[in-house]
Amino acid sequence: DFLKASDLKSAALTLPRLILAKGPMKEPDLVKNFYIISIICGFFAILTTLLMNSTIDFITITIVSGFLGLITVFLLYKYPRIRGIVVLMVILIVIGYIYLVAIDLFIIPIDFIDIDIFGLIIPTNILISLIIVIPGLLLWYYITIKYFWSEINKMKK
Protein backbone atom coordinates (compact mmCIF):
# COMPACT_ATOMS: atom_id res chain seq x y z
CA ASP A 1 0.00 0.00 0.00
CA PHE A 2 1.25 3.42 -0.94
CA LEU A 3 0.48 6.66 0.88
CA LYS A 4 -0.08 9.82 -1.14
CA ALA A 5 -0.50 13.51 -0.42
CA SER A 6 -3.98 14.96 -0.43
CA ASP A 7 -4.53 17.52 -3.15
CA LEU A 8 -7.44 19.18 -1.36
CA LYS A 9 -6.91 22.89 -0.79
CA SER A 10 -8.55 22.69 2.64
CA ALA A 11 -6.26 19.91 3.94
CA ALA A 12 -3.70 20.91 6.56
CA LEU A 13 -0.12 21.47 5.45
CA THR A 14 1.82 18.83 7.36
CA LEU A 15 5.30 17.36 7.05
CA PRO A 16 4.02 14.02 5.68
CA ARG A 17 2.05 15.94 3.09
CA LEU A 18 5.17 17.88 2.08
CA ILE A 19 7.20 14.68 1.76
CA LEU A 20 4.46 12.88 -0.16
CA ALA A 21 3.99 15.85 -2.53
CA LYS A 22 6.69 14.36 -4.76
CA GLY A 23 4.67 11.17 -5.18
CA PRO A 24 3.28 8.20 -3.26
CA MET A 25 5.50 6.05 -1.05
CA LYS A 26 5.25 3.22 1.44
CA GLU A 27 4.93 3.93 5.15
CA PRO A 28 8.39 2.55 6.14
CA ASP A 29 10.01 4.85 3.56
CA LEU A 30 8.02 7.81 4.89
CA VAL A 31 9.21 7.00 8.42
CA LYS A 32 12.84 6.83 7.22
CA ASN A 33 12.45 10.30 5.70
CA PHE A 34 11.10 11.54 9.04
CA TYR A 35 14.15 10.11 10.81
CA ILE A 36 16.52 11.82 8.37
CA ILE A 37 14.71 15.15 8.76
CA SER A 38 14.95 14.73 12.56
CA ILE A 39 18.69 14.09 12.33
CA ILE A 40 19.20 17.13 10.10
CA CYS A 41 17.09 19.26 12.49
CA GLY A 42 19.40 18.09 15.28
CA PHE A 43 22.34 19.34 13.21
CA PHE A 44 20.56 22.68 12.82
CA ALA A 45 20.04 22.85 16.59
CA ILE A 46 23.76 22.26 17.17
CA LEU A 47 24.69 24.92 14.60
CA THR A 48 22.20 27.39 16.06
CA THR A 49 23.62 26.86 19.54
CA LEU A 50 27.14 27.39 18.20
CA LEU A 51 26.04 30.54 16.35
CA MET A 52 24.77 31.98 19.63
CA ASN A 53 28.37 31.73 20.82
CA SER A 54 29.90 32.79 17.50
CA THR A 55 31.97 35.54 19.07
CA ILE A 56 33.66 33.05 21.38
CA ASP A 57 35.10 30.41 19.04
CA PHE A 58 34.77 30.91 15.27
CA ILE A 59 37.12 28.01 14.40
CA THR A 60 34.92 25.46 16.20
CA ILE A 61 31.83 26.75 14.41
CA THR A 62 33.58 26.44 11.05
CA ILE A 63 34.81 22.89 11.68
CA VAL A 64 31.50 21.63 13.10
CA SER A 65 29.52 23.37 10.32
CA GLY A 66 31.68 21.73 7.67
CA PHE A 67 31.41 18.28 9.26
CA LEU A 68 27.64 18.48 9.76
CA GLY A 69 27.26 19.99 6.29
CA LEU A 70 29.02 17.01 4.71
CA ILE A 71 26.81 14.56 6.57
CA THR A 72 23.73 16.54 5.54
CA VAL A 73 24.77 16.54 1.87
CA PHE A 74 25.27 12.76 2.03
CA LEU A 75 21.84 12.26 3.63
CA LEU A 76 20.16 14.52 1.06
CA TYR A 77 21.85 12.57 -1.73
CA LYS A 78 20.52 9.31 -0.28
CA TYR A 79 17.01 10.70 0.47
CA PRO A 80 16.11 13.09 -2.38
CA ARG A 81 12.46 13.54 -1.37
CA ILE A 82 13.39 15.77 1.55
CA ARG A 83 15.82 18.03 -0.32
CA GLY A 84 13.28 20.79 -0.91
CA ILE A 85 12.12 20.73 2.70
CA VAL A 86 15.68 20.90 4.03
CA VAL A 87 16.55 23.71 1.62
CA LEU A 88 13.53 25.64 2.92
CA MET A 89 14.73 25.03 6.50
CA VAL A 90 18.25 26.23 5.65
CA ILE A 91 16.84 29.38 4.05
CA LEU A 92 14.74 29.97 7.18
CA ILE A 93 17.77 29.58 9.44
CA VAL A 94 19.96 31.91 7.35
CA ILE A 95 17.29 34.61 7.00
CA GLY A 96 16.37 34.24 10.68
CA TYR A 97 20.01 34.67 11.68
CA ILE A 98 20.32 37.77 9.47
CA TYR A 99 17.07 39.09 10.98
CA LEU A 100 18.40 38.59 14.51
CA VAL A 101 21.75 40.21 13.75
CA ALA A 102 19.99 43.21 12.17
CA ILE A 103 17.67 43.53 15.17
CA ASP A 104 20.63 43.26 17.53
CA LEU A 105 22.53 45.96 15.62
CA PHE A 106 19.73 48.42 14.87
CA ILE A 107 16.74 47.96 17.20
CA ILE A 108 18.06 46.74 20.57
CA PRO A 109 20.60 49.58 21.08
CA ILE A 110 17.88 52.26 20.76
CA ASP A 111 16.76 53.39 24.20
CA PHE A 112 12.96 53.44 23.97
CA ILE A 113 10.63 54.10 26.87
CA ASP A 114 9.30 50.81 28.26
CA ILE A 115 5.56 50.13 28.16
CA ASP A 116 3.90 49.54 31.54
CA ILE A 117 0.68 47.50 31.35
CA PHE A 118 -0.81 46.90 34.80
CA GLY A 119 2.63 46.67 36.37
CA LEU A 120 4.01 44.43 33.64
CA ILE A 121 6.95 46.25 32.05
CA ILE A 122 7.42 45.39 28.37
CA PRO A 123 10.61 46.63 26.69
CA THR A 124 9.55 48.56 23.58
CA ASN A 125 12.54 47.47 21.52
CA ILE A 126 11.62 43.80 22.10
CA LEU A 127 8.03 44.55 21.07
CA ILE A 128 9.24 46.28 17.89
CA SER A 129 11.47 43.28 17.17
CA LEU A 130 8.49 40.93 17.41
CA ILE A 131 6.45 43.16 15.10
CA ILE A 132 9.29 43.07 12.57
CA VAL A 133 9.65 39.25 12.76
CA ILE A 134 5.94 38.41 12.28
CA PRO A 135 5.78 39.51 8.59
CA GLY A 136 8.88 37.41 7.92
CA LEU A 137 7.19 34.34 9.39
CA LEU A 138 4.07 34.99 7.31
CA LEU A 139 6.23 35.28 4.19
CA TRP A 140 7.92 32.01 5.15
CA TYR A 141 4.51 30.28 5.43
CA TYR A 142 3.51 31.65 2.02
CA ILE A 143 6.74 30.35 0.44
CA THR A 144 6.16 26.91 1.98
CA ILE A 145 2.60 26.80 0.60
CA LYS A 146 3.85 27.79 -2.87
CA TYR A 147 6.54 25.08 -2.72
CA PHE A 148 3.99 22.46 -1.73
CA TRP A 149 1.56 23.30 -4.52
CA SER A 150 4.33 23.41 -7.11
CA GLU A 151 5.32 19.87 -6.04
CA ILE A 152 1.69 18.69 -6.15
CA ASN A 153 1.28 20.16 -9.65
CA LYS A 154 4.48 18.40 -10.80
CA MET A 155 3.13 15.14 -9.43
CA LYS A 156 -0.17 15.54 -11.32
CA LYS A 157 1.61 15.98 -14.67
Image: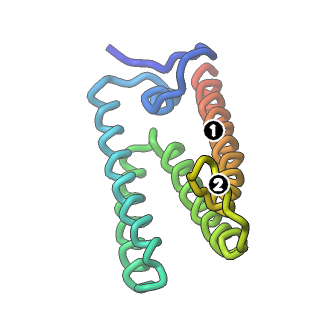
Q: SS at mark 2? A: strand
Give x and y (percent) for residue 148: 60, 31
- The quadrant in which residue 69 appears is bottom left
Residue shown at 35%/62% (left/top)?
Answer: 71
The residue at which mark 1 appears reads as 141
Amino acid type at circle 2 is Asp
Eyeballing the image, is 33 above or below 61?
above
Furthest-left residue in this view:
28
The residue at which mark 2 appears reads as 116
Give x and y (percent) for residue 29: 31, 31
- Assess whether mark 1 and mark 2 are in contact (beta carbons under 8 angstroms): no
Amino acid type at circle 1 is Tyr
Mark 1 surroundings: few (<14), some (14-19) or many (≥20) residues within 10 A: few
Q: How many marks?
A: 2
- The quadrant in which residue 125 appears is bottom right
Specify whether 3 is left or right of 156.
Answer: left
Residue shown at 34%/46% (left/top)?
Answer: 38
- The quadrant in which residue 1 appears is top left
Measure the alpha-carbon separation of dots 2 and 1: 32 Å
Eyeballing the image, is 57 above or below 50?
below
Closer to the camera in the image, 86 or 114? 114
Mark 2 surroundings: few (<14), some (14-19) or many (≥20) residues within 10 A: few
Q: Is label 2 or label 1 in front?
A: 2
Q: Earlier in the sequence, mark 2 or mark 1?
A: 2
Give x and y (percent) for residue 39: 32, 51
Residue shown at 57%/24% (left/top)?
Answer: 155
